[in-house]
Image: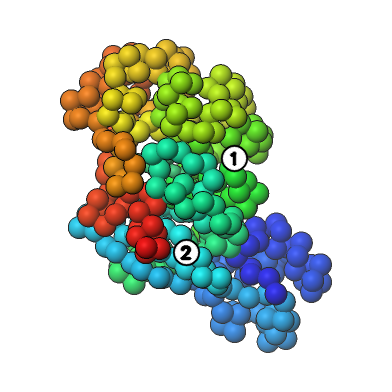
Amino acid sequence: MKNILNFTLEKLKDDLFATLGEKPYRAKQIFRWIYEKRVYDFDKMSDISLKTRDALKEHYFISLPTIFTKKVAKDGTVKILAEFEDGEKVESVIMRYRYGTAACISSQVGCNMNCAFCASGMLKKRRNLFTSEMVGQVLLLNKILEEENKGDRITHIVVMGTGEPFDNYENVVDFIYIMNEPFGLQIGARHITVSTCGLVPEIIKFSSLNLQVNLAISLHAPNDETRNMLMPINRAYPITALMDAINTYVQKTNRRLTFEYILIKNVNDSLKDAKQLADLLHGLNCYINLIPYNPIIEKPFERSEENSIKEFFEYLNKRHITCTIRKEFGSDIDAACGQLRAKVKE
Ligand code: SAH
């Protein structure tokens, strides 16, 4: 038995042909029922013959995760723990912006990257998520939006929840195709962002897909010394290797890149750091998202002082590097990465 939510449209066409001898339009029909009409039951797909529906049911099923916990913050942010068939759980978040409604999706159960400041890495990777489980998170969030207010839906996707998306490369790429599919959720590539801690081979692979999605790189430090301390992945792929891969990406895709930079008190937030950062990124088509660090009880790091954040920001501006300070969501419901799942585990 195969979960239909694992298939891109192209793969479903092939699989339906191989399994049932069905023509390609059948895959489009099924995509429309699931992603446009939100029907997750073959029996309700009324323009498919009874005989074909029975055949489909013999080989395929449609299964969404369930909501294990749900919290709603004062600012409208919704954070859920989605539970899968084997009992594993991940976080997904709905964030409301002026320009739309974004879903923050997890790509793995736990994470192996072990960044020193991050709560997710405290729960070692248990497994990759299937494509269907990433798709399922979005469908579940759409269901919540629909119940709240008919017509509201996810318009933007960020793969920035728990996990390293490029450590689950194939499944994440299929997930992107499904989100982007005109017969599916129709989320524009420019509305999809994938965030990586800097897996160089996958950044290069990703650049040749010719997708117009946004790539965000978690940089967090302007030199190898600090980055080695914060992010062990930097020992495998130091900053020069990372910048090479990024240059390849920018050349191939012509896309502007986003850098995420968390500001941690006395670790990476001095004016000297800002200067190194500006020198490093000088001339690159990019923008920097400055993120005031979200402190986690078990970690020794603190958030930068307001005035250091302001000075850091102003210095980069003066050097003509576009940057923003990230808006915070749902601070009253543990919206900091990994915290909700960690608490439920306790
Ligand atoms: N593994 C991917 C995506 C998941 S993390 C990556 O590294 O990009 C999403 C972002 O949240 C990353 O930039 C990560 O460094 C950041 N992050 C993790 N813990 C944080 C915290 N406590 N406060 C602020 N940002 C955090």
Q: With 215 as the anchor, is 208 left or right in this view?
A: right
- Identify the residue shown where x is 59% and y is 55%: 128
Residue labelled with disc 1 = 211
- Work out whether mark 1 precedes mark 2 in sequence or the reverse, and give the earlier one: 2
Question: Is residue 178 in view?
Answer: no
Where is residue 98? Give x, y as percent.
28, 47
Where is residue 248? Give x, y as percent.
61, 24
Q: Is residue 279 above or below residue 64?
A: above
Are there few (<14), some (14-19), or many (20+) residues within 10 Å of tag 1? some
Where is residue 15? Give x, y as percent.
75, 65
Colouring convention used in this rendered image of the protein: rainbow
Mark in the foreground, 1 or 2: 2
Local secondary structure at mark 1: loop
Find residue 94 and report its image quarter: bottom left
Identify residue type, mark 2.
Lys
Residue labelled with disc 2 = 89
| Quadrant holding the C terminus | bottom left
